[in-house]
Image (cartoon, helix red, strand yellow):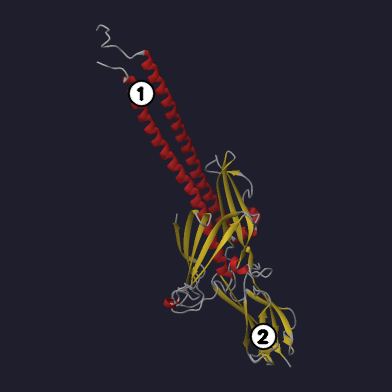
Amino acid sequence: MPFTSKNKAFGLPEVLVGLFILLCGLGVVVQLFHSGLRYSARTQRTARGAMVARKHLERARGWLHQTANWDAMGGYPSLGAWVQDGDCPEYEVRVELLPFTGLNPCSTFESSQPGAQRSLTASYKRLKVSVRQDGKAVCDLASLVGEPRRTIDLATALQITAAGPTTLTQNGTLNLSVQLKATDGVVIQDQFFNWRVAQKTGNGTVVALTRDGRTALFTHKLLLSNGRTRFVNGQVFVKAMTRYFGQPLESQIELTLGP
Amino acid sequence: MKRRGFMLVLSLMLLSLLLVAGLAFLERRVSQQDGARRAVLTARARALAEAGIEDALQKLYKDPNFPPPWEERDLAQDPLNQHLFSYQENLLDSDNVTVLGRYEVKIDHRTMRDPDYLMRISALGIVGSPDGPEASVRIQVVVDMATGNRSNDVPPNPAVGTIVEWHDESAL
């Protein structure tokens, strides 16, 4: 076919402009896809990192729920050090166990009791799990783990100790303390107690010396509502009560109140 | 037949198509990235909610006066929800300054009576500021507090103090 002005191909300027625009556009598109792929890699890294952190949190929690592990805190593998995750070696994981003090019933109530706060100092561990990849933080989780249940003998677990003779004269006082012991002899920490007097033939007064009730003072004296005092000689039981994992526990000590 | 400008139009059309495809691809990746970020925040919130449950359980296990006593009365005459004891705590880092997160605990006394003797504890783990949390997860547990065996009511109940129900839900 002859080449005429009515049937000619694209002109050079048209081709050049078209190619230029196409190349510029392609550059933008390539950039878009590149960013998308980068996002994709980051997404995968973050999502897997969260799963790795969760796995280690549960593993440490399960480990701490064994009383032997709870007592031997240093026994957790590579505690406090960055180690490679077994399933996803591209991640490094650090597990930290730190002490934690909880206020009972809550910090809002106890903030009004500076110096005499009801606290639990040995019942929790603050558990932190950090995950990183190529030195960059991916996920950090923080939680608390509570002390596991210990085996106790219901009949003998609660033990009251008197700081002096159990025979008192009028106006005489006796310091008492109480503790809860597991069958392996370990004293269970952070236990709270209530005290009361059970009249047998005599009667007296017991008051907790500390807000946790771990110590109390018995006095051979009754304070009446009219402000007067009265002495009731005879035998009296002083009882300490607590609750351990829902189980109410009670123990008593017998005192003799003389003239 | 005029063909001037045809190459330009073709280029622009092709380019537009590629651009739309690229933008759609990017948008999808951004939304996936947002989902992954949310997964991390939810994992954090869940860990905080678990901290709230552990906090409440230890107090419940070791203190006969926890939660603070509630006088039993007709629930209809309890418009202020006094049958609920609730509190919130910040979980601080080891420096005792940096706030790692927050949890809110609610303890429901209503079923601590015959024949149920169940304590319901709910903990909400919150990541972010209290005004505009980035993520939150609520965990609800039910603890068996019956001292007598549930089959014959004779003490002891071997399951006393154990968690009999555990619900985990993402709130945000």
| Left or right side of A231 for B52 | left
| Left or right side of B134 for A154 | right
Q: Is residue B121 visible?
A: yes
Q: Is residue A121 above or below residue A29?
A: below
Q: Position of residue A135 (x, y in %)?
A: 59, 40
A249 or A194: nearer the eye?
A194
Callout 1: residue from which chain?
B
Q: Nearer the viewer, mark 1 or mark 2?
A: 1
Q: Residues within 10 Å of mark 2 (few under 14, many from 20)?
A: some
Q: Residues within 10 Å of mark 1 (few under 14, many from 20)?
A: many
B143 or B126: nearer the eye?
B126
Q: Which mark is residue A204?
A: none
For mark 1, what is the residue? B11
Q: Position of residue A142 (x, y in %)?
A: 57, 54
Q: Is residue B36 above or below residue A218?
A: above
Q: Is residue A93 above or below residue A240?
A: above
Q: Position of residue B109 (x, y in %)?
A: 48, 72
Callout 2: residue from which chain?
A
A231 or B145: nearer the eye?
A231
Question: Residue at (46%, 42%) from the top-left corner?
Answer: B33
Q: Residue B20's image quarter?
A: top left
Q: Amino acid at mark 2?
A: Thr
Question: Residue at (61%, 66%) from the top-left corner?
Answer: A103
Q: Tell me the quarter of the image containing the C terminus of chain A.
A: bottom right
Q: Which mark is residue A205?
A: 2
Q: Secondary structure at mark 2?
A: strand
A220 or B26: nearer the eye?
B26
Q: Position of residue B62 (x, y in %)?
A: 59, 70
Q: Secondary structure at mark 1?
A: helix
